[in-house]
Amino acid sequence: MSIIKNIRQLKGAAVLAERKAATPSLDFKRYNLIYGFNGSGKSTLSRIFATLQAGAKHQRLPETCVFEIEMEDGTRYACPASLAGLEKRVCVFNHDFIRENLRWDKGAATPVFYIGADQAEAAAQLKTLEASLPAAIAKRDGETQVVKERDKAFAEFKRLTAGQARERLRQPGRYEAAQYIADIEKLGANAKDVLDPANLDAAGATCARSEPPAKVSSVALSVDQILLSIASAAELAPKTIGSVVIEGFEAHPAMVPWVQQGHDYHLAHDLKECLFCGEGLTTARKALLSQAFDDKMTTFIKAVAYAASEARLSVDAIVIARAAVPTAAQLSAEFHTAFEAAATTFNVSLNDIQPLLEQALAALEARRAAPTNPVAIVLPPLEDVAAGVVALGEATTALNAICEKHGEMVDDFNAHQRKAREAIRRHYVAESANGYAQHQASIELATSAEKTAIAAVDTLQDAIATLRAKVQQHGPAADKINALASSYLGHGELTIVAVEEGYELHRHGALVRGEPSEGEKTAIALCYFLSTLEADEKKIKDLIIVVDDPVSSLDTKAMNYACGLIRNRLMNAAQLFVLTHNQQCMNEFKKAWKNRARDEPAKRTASLKFIDVAVPAATQTRTSTIIDLPKHLRDYESEYHYLFGKVLVFEAAGGGHFDYTFMMPNVLRRILEIFLAFKVPRDGNISDKLKTVALRHATLDLDRLNALERLTQVESHSDNLDDLIAQSSMTIEESQEANGALIHLMEVVDGVHLADLRTYCV
């Protein structure tokens, strides 16, 4: 069966460094040792594995944690999206497992079930139902996800629709999805409420105004006079005057008005001689002129003059009216379309009538200038002209009606703006009604499917629980746990006793009062975990087993037994991970798996890893990276060489940045302890031993030894690497001084030893 090959991607996992698809593979093998100091991220790593076991994100992983696990066969499992598949194969032992299953304060544990041999048929049915449960759960979760996605899509639909309306409304107070939903319920959807783009834009423009627009003036134009002027021209301009026969008039028709005026003056003053030429005016000449300028002629000339004057006034009125038409932009936006159409009609009518009127004016002006000469004029039939004039009047009335409506709106702008906002809200309610209903229907369908899927899972789980209660027995597991614990502890004082709801922890046949020792807790917890690996018909050969910190407060013999128990019991597992902070425990597994890890790459079955904690200059944040086990930890039983390697690199860094500066005070303290333990092998604290060394070596710089004294006062005693990455209160400068002082001490006290360390620890 396929095993875990790599953590392909990782982000947001507390101190553990981010991993990406391009990050080199961890290349896990069948047997994997992962060594790291306390606080380096082992618990987080074990919870990542526990997430695979549960098929759901571990509750104690950071909220932002996401990861992707790659299997040897290329299969991938991702958190939180795609976790199902390894629940029956991954088994994790860590502090969370102990906390969830063993209640030390009550001396109790949850049951470990085995299938009874006499319940084979029910067991087979149980197995079938359990096999179908993941698919049912996946379907339920899928339907739940569909509901969430459709709820999200519906919420987005309402948000976007409300946003579109809000952009138009421009009203005090934001128009959000809640107001939109309220309008859906209050206003209802009516197709007639849908506005065309122009009216929607107009309503939006009205809402955008902070104050009403100015009023516009109506167009003043009398169409009756226009028709009368054209009709007069058609009648008067071509009219002939038969009584005009005086010689010379035909040759000089323009003189007719002047002659008539002179004739009338001479008669009125009874002049006998012509004022212009001085010749005498004969009675015959006066009679001839009087006959020519009788009342009809006078009336005709006056009629032509009057008609010409009125025609001129009508032409001027048209010019003024054309210029007086307001632009659409001067009106409120909702009137723009109608006004532009009315203005176009008005201009078309003007363009039809104005040339006719100007033609009539020109003819009348010509006839007034020469009253005796007819003027030809070509006009459409008078009924057609009348129809055009009527159309002009109607166009003028329509144009002015819109201007008046605009004025009424200006007078009551607030009410008009309220109506515009309501129209916009109604528009969006009506326009989005189908989409709204479709979202509701899709959610109802998805919710119904989800309820069906939930019911199916509940029914299946109830059936499984019923069958499990029928076939499971947890009594036999107690014997196995007791046998393991007895061998582990070397005595049979502590025993596991099966009770109805699980197990009780007994000592000398009575319920344990008070918590067991740490060593006993470790023994019971580990033996309990090992017993679960064969429960529920699991087979170790199929399992991916993760053991995090399997030893705690154990003496050497118990620790060796615990490590041996894990190796021997779990050597046939499909894959085994051992995570530890204990150097002795690390050495036990390292010895057992070192050759497997050194084999040719194709034959390699073990990997030795280290969780390296550093503070890179780029981030200035404590970060843990899983790397191959450093050679000094891999090749030596003691941590001494590994730690001194850090001293040499710290020395080489000088005043520059060093990724491990934060841990150097603890490192220096530990090296100093080990070095002085050999040079001053008597009992005593570091300070006393430093004084002894100072007395023996007069060349020691006592001022530099003060830096080591400061180190002993600040850093607590440590007999292991457990707390090496704890933050120190020493400054960087103090750490650098202590580093130099330690090297000085070793050079003076045992220069050969220091030289060897410089050779082997690089």
Image (spheres, rainbow, N blue to C red):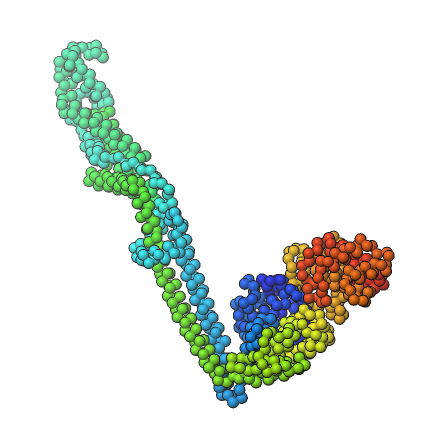
Residue 535 vs 376, above or below: the answer is below
Please tell me which residue lies in front, 700 or 451.
700
Q: Position of residue 740 (x, y in %)?
A: 78, 56
The one of 189 and 619 positioned closer to us in this rendering = 619
**546 vs 729, nearest the viewer:** 729
**From the viewer's perspective, is 38 left or right of 347?**
right
Q: With 439 as the anchor, is 394 left or right in this view?
A: left
> Is the residue 274 above or below the residue 249 in the image?
above
Q: Residue at x 71, y 77 (%)?
A: 557
Residue 631: image quadrant is bottom right
- Please determine whether, in this image, residue 644 is positioned above or below residue 133: above
- The quadrant of the image that shows the C terminus is bottom right
Q: Residue at x 57, y 72 (%)?
A: 99
Q: Residue at x 53, y 88 (%)?
A: 117
- Viewer can see residue 622: yes
In the displayed structure, 597 sits above or below 656; it is below
The image shows residue 52 at horizontal and vertical percentages of: 56, 72
Count how many numbered circles sit on residues in the image: 0
- Left of 231 or right of it: where is 542? right
- Residue at 66% from the left image edge and 70% from the top image edge: 580
Q: Quadrant of the N terminus?
A: bottom right
- Residue 342 place in picture, x, y as percent: 29, 43
Q: Is residue 651 visible?
A: no
Rendered image quadrant of residue 610: bottom right
Q: Residue 43 in the image: state x and y as whole percent.
A: 61, 68
Q: Residue furthest bottom?
A: 118
Quarter of the rendering containing residue 40? bottom right
